[in-house]
């Protein structure tokens, strides 16, 4: 490695992270498509499935900061690999178990690991990439991940088509295997050259044991409101399509595929140039406005006056396209804001806390949005939350100081 230029080493380092992310997302794409059906086949009612998922994702959000603190104390790479190992263990238990208590425990382990991994992945990018390119690299990972999710979802669809529980078990076990490979890639492929700071009773790590600042708290809560677009697509939209007269069931998968491919194609382009506080604010505000518009379009099309099939398809298409545009703009702004608010130490704890906004939305979103799916004016609630969240995040955007060359967050080298 000594003969490699730093830029080449950095590209190789981030390519390894991209490979690991793609493997995990491919498995998750298949798991997301089949998980509800699998739990129902194990004897869980749809209501109990919803309650279980809400509890597990909520617990995952609460655990994220603690796992981030472990990463700050004992090493980002080591704890990241261990967290991915927890995802593997949870999925393996889910594939092999059938007793309700075992299934609930396995899903809780998986959700906890998944929730923390999102924040740790952001911290790995922050440690591995040039600070000016961190948002673009996050966008590249997002595009890779969406392509992998689409592949995994296709595999999950085949398993659902077979209609056999053994096929669903194979999907869950396959996701566990991919997490094992991902864990090994992280553990063996990346190492941080600067040793992780350690804490003691007399000298805690600055920023690690301190409380979350008010701007960080506002950003996290506001981001969870904007991430409601996830359960809006996975819960509210399928319910509305199912209940809308004359709309074919395949429209659900078509909307999911359009979203996935759209984000994959547009995310990196949307992130280019989001490098200043002004552009971050603009990305957050425009992203929130587009998500609110998308919500209005989808709700009005599906639950308004009965429309001709061609107009329904047109309205759905416009709503999904607007949603993709809003998602990629919001994501770019949210990532840059997360890096702007990052402390000089305790970085993993902060990124894990900030990343917990996603499981928070996954936990609360179905309970909030599902009851609204049958109301014509139900779009007002998510639209209002999107706008309020975007404005709140824009208000706490700060100017990110230029990092010192000696800052340990930005000194990472490729492992052997």
Image (cartoon, rainbow, N blue to C red):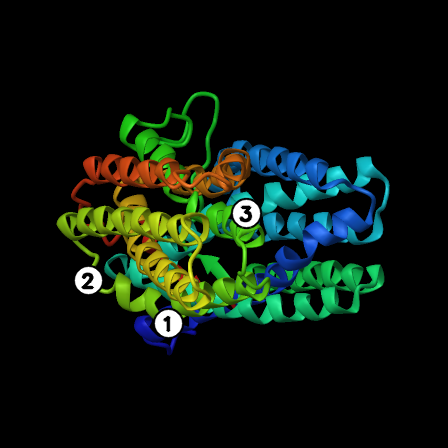
Q: Of 294 and 364, which appears nearest the observer?
A: 294
Measured in 3D between alpha carbons, the distance from the residue under mark 3 to the one under mark 1, in whole angstroms, is 24 Å
Q: Sequence-wise, which precedes: disc 2 or disc 1? A: 1
Which residue does the numbered mark 2 point to in the structure image? 273
* Marked residue nearer the N-terminal end (3 or 1): 3
Residue 71 picture location, percent across and down: 50, 42
Q: Nearer the viewer, residue 369 or 204?
A: 369
Secondary structure category for the residue under label 2: loop
Q: How many marks?
A: 3
Q: Tell me the crowding category of disc 2: few under 14, some 14 to 19, or many 20 or more residues within 10 angstroms, Cα based.
A: some
Name the residue: 18% across, 45% down: 401
The quadrant where residue 218 appears: top left
Q: Which residue is mark 3?
A: 235
Depth order, front residue of 333/238: 238
Q: Secondary structure at mark 3?
A: helix
Q: Is residue 222 visible?
A: yes
Residue 293 relative to residue 242: left or right: left
Q: Secondary structure at mark 1?
A: helix
Residues at discs 3 and 1 in contact (Cβ within 8 Å): no
Residue found at the very far left of the displayed protein: 278
Foreground disc of the pair 2, 3: 3
Using the image, determine if residue 414 lies above or below residue 82: below
Instruction: Tell me if 78 is positioned left or right of 227 in this view.
Output: right
Mark 2–mark 1 Cα distance, whole angstroms, equals 17 Å
Residue at the image position 37 percent from the left and 33 percent from the top: 221
Disc 2, disc 1: CB below 8 Å? no
Task: Kindly identify which numbered label has been placed on residue 395.
Answer: none
| In the image, residue 63 above or below residue 355 | above
The residue at the far bottom in this view is 3
Image location of residue 147, percent across then percent down: 49, 70
The circle on residue 265 is: 1
């Amino acid at each position: 490695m000594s003969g490699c230029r730093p830029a080449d080493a950095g590209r190789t380092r981030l390519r390894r992270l991209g490979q690991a992310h793609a493997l995990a997302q491919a498995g998750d794409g298949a798991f997301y498509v089949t998980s509800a059906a699998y739990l129902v086949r194990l004897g869980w009612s749809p209501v109990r499935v919803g309650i279980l998922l809400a509890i597990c994702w909520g617990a995952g959000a609460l655990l994220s900061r603690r796992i981030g603190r472990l990463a700050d104390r004992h090493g980002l790479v080591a704890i990241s690999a261990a967290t991915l190992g927890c995802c593997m263990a949870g999925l393996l238990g889910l594939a092999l178990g059938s007793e309700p208590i075992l299934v609930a425990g396995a899903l809780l382990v998986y959700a906890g690991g998944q929730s923390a991994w999102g924040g740790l992945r952001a911290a790995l990018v922050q440690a591995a990439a040039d600070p000016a390119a961190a948002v673009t690299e996050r966008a590249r990972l997002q595009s890779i991940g969406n392509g992998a999710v689409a592949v995994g979802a296709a595999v999950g669809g085949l398993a659902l088509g077979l209609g056999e529980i053994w096929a669903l078990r194979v999907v869950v076990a396959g996701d566990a295997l991919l997490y094992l490979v991902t864990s090994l890639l992280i553990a063996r492929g990346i190492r941080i050259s600067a040793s992780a700071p350690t804490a003691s009773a007399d000298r805690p790590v600055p920023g690690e044991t301190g409380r979350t600042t008010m701007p960080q708290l506002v950003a996290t809560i506001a981001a969870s409101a904007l991430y409601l677009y996830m359960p809006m697509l996975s819960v509210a939209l399928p319910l509305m399509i199912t209940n809308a007269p004359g709309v074919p069931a395949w429209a659900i998968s078509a909307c999911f595929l359009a979203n996935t491919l759209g984000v994959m194609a547009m995310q990196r382009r949307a992130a280019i140039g989001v490098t200043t506080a002004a552009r971050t604010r603009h990305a957050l505000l425009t992203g929130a406005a587009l998500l609110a518009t998308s919500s209005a379009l989808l709700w009005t099309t599906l639950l308004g006056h009965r429309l001709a099939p061609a107009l329904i398809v047109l309205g759905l298409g416009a709503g999904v396209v607007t949603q993709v545009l809003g998602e990629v703009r919001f994501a770019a702004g949210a990532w840059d804001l997360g890096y702007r608010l990052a402390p000089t130490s305790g970085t993993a704890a902060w990124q894990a806390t900030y990343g917990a906004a996603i499981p928070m939305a996954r936990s609360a979103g179905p309970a909030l949005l599902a009851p609204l799916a049958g109301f014509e004016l139900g779009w007002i609630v998510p639209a209002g939350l999107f706008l309020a969240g975007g404005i709140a995040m824009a208000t706490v955007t700060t100017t990110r100081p230029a990092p010192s060359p000696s800052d340990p967050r930005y000194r990472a080298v490729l492992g052997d």
